[in-house]
Image (spheres, coloured by chain):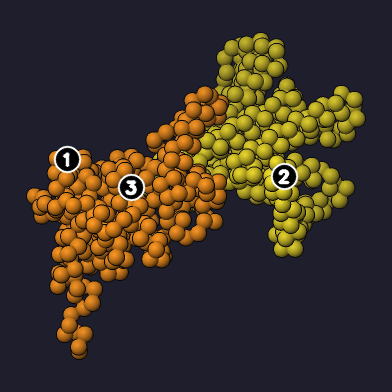
Chain colours: A orange, B yellow
Amino acid sequence: MSEKERKPQTQMVPYPSGSSVPERDLGYMPVLECSHLGIEFGGLKAVDDFSVVMGRTEIGGLIGPNGAGKTTVFNLLTKVYQPTHGTMMLEGKDMGNMSTVDVSKAGIARTFQNIRLFNNMTVEENVRIGLHNQIGSGMFSSILRLPSHWKTEKQQHEKTLELLDIFDMAKMADERAGSLPYGAQRRLEIVRALATKPKLLLLDEPAAGMNPHETEELMETITRIRDQFQIAILLIEHDMSLVMGICEDICVLNFGKIIAKGTPAEIQANPAVIEAYLGKRKEAEA
Amino acid sequence: MNTKKKRFMINLITYAVLAVVFVVLTIMINNKTISRTLKGMLIPICSWIVMAISLNLVVGISGELSLGHAGFMGIGAFSGIIVSGWLLNGMQMEDPTLRLVISLVAGGLIAGIFGALIGIPVLRLRGDYLAIVTLAFGEIIKNIMNCVYVSVDGQALNFGFLNGNLPGTLLLNGPMGAVKVKTIATFTAGFVLIIFSLIVVLNLVNSRSGRAIMAARDNRIAAEAMGINITKYKMMAFVTASVLAGMAGALYGLSMATLLPTKFSFNESINVLVFVVLGGIGNIPGSIISATALTILPEKLRFLQNYRMLAYAVLLILVMLLSNNPLLKSLWRRLIHREKDEDGKEGIRA
C-alpha cells in the first residue's frame, strides 16, 4: 500500500472549539471532545488547557518531547487520574463521574507504553479478558457449568481467534503471553484493547522497539483497523515516519501545553514545533 | 499438549486420585485394617484440605493475603454445632445425614456473610490491608466465641453474652466451648465436601470470572483498563473462600465431642497458610497433598515427645530448601522434558 492509498483523501475541516475533524465525520457526533482539560500534581501543572476534538473515524497523533505530558493525557482520558480542570465528553456523554471501568465500558480502550499484559496467562486468555464485558456468563453458571457457560465460552473462543487473525496471531493462541517476542506483545495489547469493542482506541507508542519493516506493517494494520471497525484512533509516537504517514490531525504537547495543532504538513512547517524539538537557533549557537 | 488440555488433565487426575484414595480407605475401614490414629484423623484431614483449597483461592488465585482463615472456620464450626443441636433438640430431627448437610450449609452461609462484611470495606483498598484486618478479625472472633453462651429450650434458641444462666440444654458454654456435641460428621461427608470445594474452585478458576480474578492479580491497572471491576472479583474469591472455610469448620466441629474456641487461633491460620505455601501458591492439587502430609506429620512425630514441633519446623525448612535446590530443579525439569519429547514423537507418528 503506498502512502497515497493509505491516507484517505478527506479534507480536515475546522470544528467550533478550535479543533478540526475529517470532513467524512461531519455528519456524526465527534467521538471525543475535551475542553480545557488539566491536572495539577501539588501545584505542578502536568497537563494544562488541553482541548481536542476527535472525529468518528479520525486517526490523531499526540507528539512532543519526553516528559511533555502525553501519557498523562491518556491517563486522564481513561480516568487513571481524575482531571482537576475541564470536561471530557465521549460521543456527547459527559465523562466527569466515570471510573476507569466505566470509561472502558463506555468505549475507550488503550495500550500501555510499558507493556502491561497478563504475563502468566495465555494469549487467548489475554484477549478473553478484553471480551469480558462483551460476552460472558455469571459466576454461578460457570461453577455449575450450565449450558450458558459453554455457549459463552465457545463464543469467546471464536471471537478471540477472529480478533487474533487481524495480526495473524491465531496460531500463538495457546502460548504464554509473557514468552512472546516484544513486537508480538505490543500487537497482542492492541488486539486485547480492540476486544473491548472501543469507539476510541488509544495507542501509547505502538511502534516502540519495532524495526522499520515492522513499523511499515503496523501503519497498514492501524489504518485497516480504523476502516474495518470504523473507530477513532489516537496515538502517541516518537517515530515520525509513522505519525506523518497515517495521522490526519496532529497535536503537539510541550510542558503540558498544546503548542500546535494541525495536519502533518502544517506541523512540519510550524516554527514552535521545531523549536520544541531542536531548540532555538540562537541558543544552539551560543 | 496445549495449556488448556494440560490443565484439564491435571484436574481430571486430581479427581481420579482422590476417588481412588477414598475407595481404598473405605475398604480399609470396613476391613478394620486401618490404624486407630489414622482413622481418627480422617475427618480433620478432610476439613484441613478444604481449608487449604479455599485459602489458596484467596492467596494464590486472587493474590490477597488473608491471615484469619481460621476465624471463618471457627464461625462455621460453632454455627454448625448450634444448628445441628437445635435441629436435634428443638426440631426432633433424628436423621444425622440431613442434619449434617443442613449444618454444613448453615456454617458456610454464616461464614460467607462475615466474609462479605469484611471484604466490602477492605477489598476496595490496595495493598496489604486485608492481611491486617483478617488477622484482627480472627482474634476478635476467637475472643467473642469465648464469651458466648447458647442453649436450646424447646424450639427456641437462647443467646447469652458473658452470662451462662440460660434455660434448656446448653450448646455453647462460653470458654468451655461446645459441649456434648453429637459427632455426626463422617468420612464420606468429608470426601464429598472436598470434591464439592474442588468443583467450585476449579470451575471458578477456569471460567470468565476466574480469568478476571487472575487478571486483577497479575496487573491491576491493565485489568481496570479492560473494564474489570477489581473489587467485585476480589470479593467473589474472598467470599467463596469464606463459605468453603465455614463448611470445613462445620465438618470439623461436628467430628469432635468437645471443641474449644481457642482452637481457632492465629496459629491455625498460619498453619493453613503453610499448607498453601508448601503445596505451591495457586496450585490446588499441591494444597491437597501438603494439607494431608502436614496434618499427619506431627502425629507421626509423637515419638520425639518434646522435640516434636522442633522436628516439624526443621522438616518444613528442609522441604523448602530442597524444593528450591537448583540441582533437584534441573533434574525435575529434565524429567518433564523427556515426557514432552515423547509426546512430540507420538504426535509425529500419529
- In the rendered structure, find residue B92 and report the number of the disc placed on it: none
Q: Amino acid at mark 2?
A: Arg
Residue A195 picture quarter:
top left
Of badges 3 and 1, the one in the foreground is 3
The chain to which mark 1 is attached is A
**B313 in relation to B294, above or below:** below
Per the image, the residue denoted by label 1 is A28
The chain to which mark 2 is attached is B
> Which SS class for mark 1?
loop
Relative side of A160 to B69, left or right: left
> Residue B73's x, y, as percent?
62, 35
Per the image, the residue denoted by label 2 is B349
- Label 3 and label 2 in one chain: no
How far apart marks 3 and 1 lie (CA) works out to 19 Å
What's the residue at 66%, 49% (across, down)?
B280
> Residue A106's x, y, as percent?
29, 40
Residue sitting nearer the eye, A286 or A26: A26
- Residue B330 makes an appearance in the image: yes
